[in-house]
Image (cartoon, coloured by chain):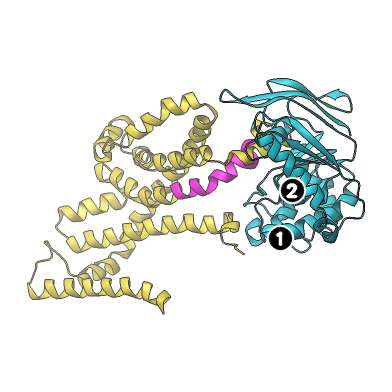
Chain colours: A yellow, B cyan
Amino acid sequence: MKKYGSKLLPALLITAILLFWESAVSVLSIPLYVLPSPTQVIRALLEESATLALHASTTVLEALAGMGLSVILAVFLGLVMDCFPLMRRSIYPILVVTQTVPMIVMAPILIIYMGFGIAPKIFTVVLMCFFPIAVSFCDGLSQVDKDYVNLVRSYGAGPLLTYRLVKIPSAIPSLISGLKVAATYSISGAVVGEWIGAQKGLGYYILRVKNSYMLDRVFACVIVIIALSLCMNGLICLYQYHALPYLQKRR
Amino acid sequence: MKLNVQELTFSYEKKKILDKLTFSIQDGEFVSLLGPSGCGKSTILKLLSGVLTPEAGKVTVDGQSIRDLSQEFSYMPQNDLLFPWKTILDNVCLYGRIHGSLDAVRQEAKKRFLKFGLSGYEDSYPSQLSGGMRQRAAFLRTSLCQADILLLDEPFGALDVITRGEMQDWLLEMRKNLSRTVLLVTHDMDEAIYLSDRILILSPSPARVTHELKLEETNRSREWLYCQSRLRKEIHGAIMANASL
């Protein structure tokens, strides 16, 4: 009962909010260009499903490409920072600084440098996703139990084998935690990139319908963005489930 | 293989842990190092296994000088240190994985699973095993190394009293088949008496051997152990005499 209760309560709360929202829009006769009702949003979602799917495919492609690049870069840099403490001390503060620059400021600059193609969107995703992956992987590597390292060393393993046998596998759960955060950022990153200058994608679509005051479609697009972000997170969870079976197996 | 440790010296953060420690172990002998906490027992094993480097001193195995990491030793630390992401079979084959002889070690490991009470758990993960089984798996991993000298660092220290007793009985039984030289670090007097051919008692840090006991009983049992009050008194007396130094 307790198990179902924990899931039932948030569902009930969301239902209550939606009912209040629906009745408030209806009773107060709020116009569509100010606040659409939940039913209007759902109607727009169904009517625009084909268009949304088309734009979503572009956004997902950019997000996946950005995530892929981020993982490669983050793993490489994480290993470099762990191997060379001097590099860690030099690079880590720069990584932190890159996260303080607002992406909405960076995106137009990227368009100046890279044009209006897919490249600046992918790079925006990289800028948003790279940091959580790199930091979590790097921390994971530095927190490896030294006794494990000593054990494989005493068995005759060299530095490369020590990374392969102990350090990298130990840091994988941390890397996955970073991936989960990055995965939820990836769709938003692509949308920000498209917002500044694009011919397709959810960011472009949302800007177009907003300029036409079709707020039901704006909200429908937001729902799609949320759903896609959750799907990206779910993909990482699925990967974790299959790649790290030992986490599920307990005595 | 005969192990000789001569004037081994080691300091940590300017504190001298070992100062000219000297002892030797005969081929096939089971020797326990007994001493107060922090006297440097585990450091001795880490120095022998090459995890730490001594400041001075010499270690020889059958007259050959040993430097840095050596294939003569197989080290079993206090915790089982099984990799949680690997199955038990993969864990115990670590030595083969490192030295490119995985298939041969796998075959040998599969033969020993029954003897080590791990049969049927080859594909399990360490988190699915009890504490005693994990220690047995760690011991199997140690025994699968092509090393003639086993260095055991309080292997049962993390276990509850009952499991610990069971593991000691099991190791006593295993000793007959091991035919290896063993150096066991322990702070448990009864464990040392029960398992060893010889007990070396260490002084507080900086450690040196202050007392030595030879145990010649070949037919050991729990009943035999319970009657060893004279030995217990002697060891206790030696440790207390060290403490007052």
Task: Tell me if residue A146 can be seen.
Answer: yes
Viewer-nearest residue: A134 or B4: B4
Which range of residues does the magenta coloring cover? A162-178
- The answer to which image quadrant residue B16 occupies is top right
Camera-nearest label, 1 or 2: 2
Q: Position of residue B121 (x, y in %)?
A: 73, 61
- Which residue is the site of mark 1? B163
Label 2, secondary structure: give it.
Answer: helix
- Disc nearer the start of the sequence (1/2): 1
- The answer to which image quadrant residue B89 occupies is bottom right
- Which residue is the site of mark 2? B189
Q: Residues within 10 Å of mark 1 (few under 14, many from 20)?
A: some
Image height of B143 relative to A78, above or below? below
Query: Which chain is mark 2 on?
Result: B
Viewer-nearest residue: B214 or B32: B214
Image quarter in which the C terminus of chain B is found: top right
Q: Position of residue B80 (x, y in %)?
A: 67, 49
Lateral position of residue B114 relative to residue A92, left or right: right
Residue visible at 35% across and 34% down in the picture: A96
Are both tags, 1 and 2, on one chain?
yes
What is the total number of numbered labels drawn onto the structure image?
2
Q: Position of residue A55 (x, y in %)?
A: 33, 54
Q: Main secondary structure of the magenta part?
A: helix
Q: Position of residue A144 (x, y in %)?
A: 55, 41
Residue visible at 76% across and 47% down in the picture: B233
Type of amino acid at the residue the image marks with label 2: Met
Residue visible at 8% across and 76% down in the picture: A27
Query: Which chain is mark 1 on?
Result: B
Type of amino acid at the residue the image marks with label 1: Thr
Residue extending farthest to the bottom is: A1
Residue visible at 32% across and 32% down in the picture: A97
- The answer to which image quadrant residue B8 occupies is top right
